[in-house]
Image (cartoon, helix red, strand yellow):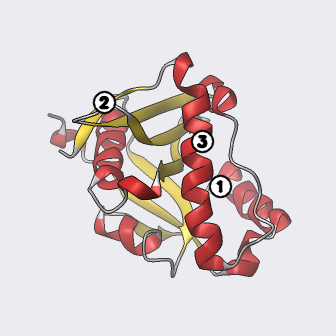
Amino acid sequence: MSGAIRHAEASDAEMIQSVETAADALLIDALGAWSWPPAGDGVSRLASPGFLLVVEEETSHSPVGFVHVLDVDGHAHLEQLSVVPSAGRQGHGRDLVIAALEEARERGYSRVTLRTYAEVPWNAPFYASCGFLESIPETPFLRELVDTESALGLDRYGRRVQMTVELDPAARR
């Protein structure tokens, strides 16, 4: 593991928003998406149903990323994965995804979904390497996400896809 992972705390709210803003800057640049929506509010993320995990660098114990998994109608949805660019490509994102899947499994979820860009290397191809497969939005919440993304204009920057990973309950540690 490349860093220590822990549950987010109320004192992490400001850091969560700043990490997402820094990570979004990389995506904005890659997509040429100069009218990108602002990063989510850390307080709102912490208050939403589900869970939020933070990764800290082992040497400095500084938070460098987070994963936010929503619980919507008993369904686990990976809403956001962000790692500051200066800590990128060091395994933090993968560690966060693995930890989020384990946490979801322990909470009794049978699958986790997400929505992302199909062609951005650190989006769909990365999630595919973590076991996610392209899927069809099956629930009202997931179909609503497609409409929300369209209303925000996210689809003008590239093809958006839903991805799902099935969780094997027997794989619990």
Among the two numbered marks 1 and 2 on one chain, the one whose residue lies closer to the N terminus: 2
Q: In x, y percent, where is residue 17? A: 62, 39
Residue type at the position of mark 2: His
Among the two numbered marks 2 and 3 on one chain, the one whose residue lies closer to the N terminus: 3
Q: In x, y percent, where is residue 160? A: 62, 73
Q: Nearer the viewer's eye, disc 1 or disc 3?
A: 3
Q: In x, y percent, where is residue 69? A: 50, 40
Residue 42, quarter of the rendered image: top right
State the residue lying farthest toward the top: 10
The residue identified by callout 3 is: 18
Circle 1 SS class: helix
- Crowd tier of the residue under label 1, counting other residues whose Cα lies within 10 Å: few below 14, some 14–19, many 20 or above: some
The residue identified by callout 2 is: 61
Query: From the viewer's perspective, is 72 left or right of 90?
Result: right
Please report contact status of discs 1 and 3: CB closer than 8 Å, yes or no. Answer: no
Q: Residue at x 77, y 57 (%)?
A: 37
Circle 2 SS class: loop
Residue type at the position of mark 1: Leu
Q: CA distance from mark 1 to mark 3?
A: 27 Å
Badge number at residue 142: 1
Query: From the viewer's perspective, is 4 left or right of 173?
Result: right
Q: CA distance from mark 2 to mark 3?
A: 17 Å
